[in-house]
Amino acid sequence: MTSYRISQLAERSGVPTTTLRFYEDAGLLTADRTPAGYRVYGEDAVERLAFISSAKLLGLALEEIRELLEVREEGVCASVRARMLPLVAGRITETDGRIAELRAFAARLAGVHADLCGPAPAGACGADCGCTTTAAPGPVPVQLSRTPPAPEPDLEAWRRAPVACTLGGAELGERTEQWQTLIGRAERRETIPDGLRLVFPAGADLAAEVAALAAAEQSCCAFFDFTLRLAPDALQLDVRAPQSAAGMLADLFGVTV
């Protein structure tokens, strides 16, 4: 029977060892121990990791994936499908809602941009000059956060959060290339506590692109914290990560914390 040490399983599956340990702590992956205390995994761990990675790509939460794995262990595909169907349907509804919000916000930005392109009034700003807009449906700024915003976030607990990424191999390389391409379009890059700030020229299409990439990144690397702010003349993305993720922050964005 084939068995793997944790480093061998990481190479075989393309999942980093830090993520494998995180999955074990979260109850998604089990390991036997050698007399010396080393982790040993069976061949079934490779298939289990492939299933976990697939579920993560669908945006499923760890608790939902854990439930699916329990059903999967029964060995009946129909049961797994029956459990997955409502979960995927829920993600479709959430995604459609997010797309609708982004489109509405993009339309709002386009309207403000059109107003600002017109002739400016003589003198100071006024009620109808276009610099001040009325409230509109949809969240402003767009907040893509690890957790719902709290009045007093526990920053120390966040900085100690486990670092785990579900991407590997070609997917990780493709994601890194997407970020590097986007960063190349930034007007400037600034260091902030725990991360960096990217400032882009204002544009509805770019806002949707930045939001979509940040959301995709957070679905595989939940320890990242993204805040997107939009102003008439600029688009600002703040990216933060705990100290334990300094290496990944440097790889993706070229900054150390």
Image (spheres, rainbow, N blue to C red):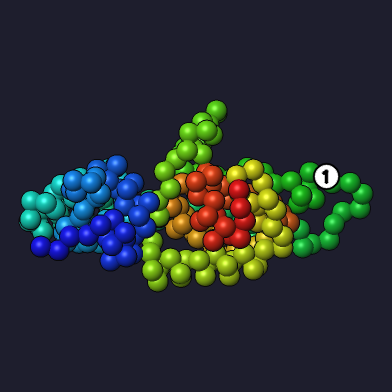
- Kindly tell me whether residue 219 is visible in this rendering: no
Observer-nearest residue: 31 or 145?
A: 31
Observer-nearest residue: 170 or 87?
A: 170
Observer-nearest residue: 149 or 172?
A: 172
Q: Residue at x 55, y 64 (%)?
A: 179
Measured as percent of width and height from the top left, residue 256 is found at 61, 53
| Residue behind mark 1 | 126
Measured as percent of width and height from the top left, residue 7 is found at 31, 59
Answer above or below: position of 149 versus 186. Answer: above
Q: Residue at x 57, y 67 (%)?
A: 180
* Kind of residue indicated by mark 1: Gly
Q: Residue at x 46, y 69 (%)?
A: 173
95 relative position to 205: left or right: left
- Kindly tell me whether residue 171 is visible in this rendering: yes
Residue at the limit of the structure toward the right, as seen here: 123
Which secondary structure, mark 1? loop
234 relative position to 170: left or right: right
222 relative position to 256: left or right: left
Measured as percent of width and height from the top left, residue 111 is found at 66, 58
The image quadrant where one finds the N terminus is bottom left
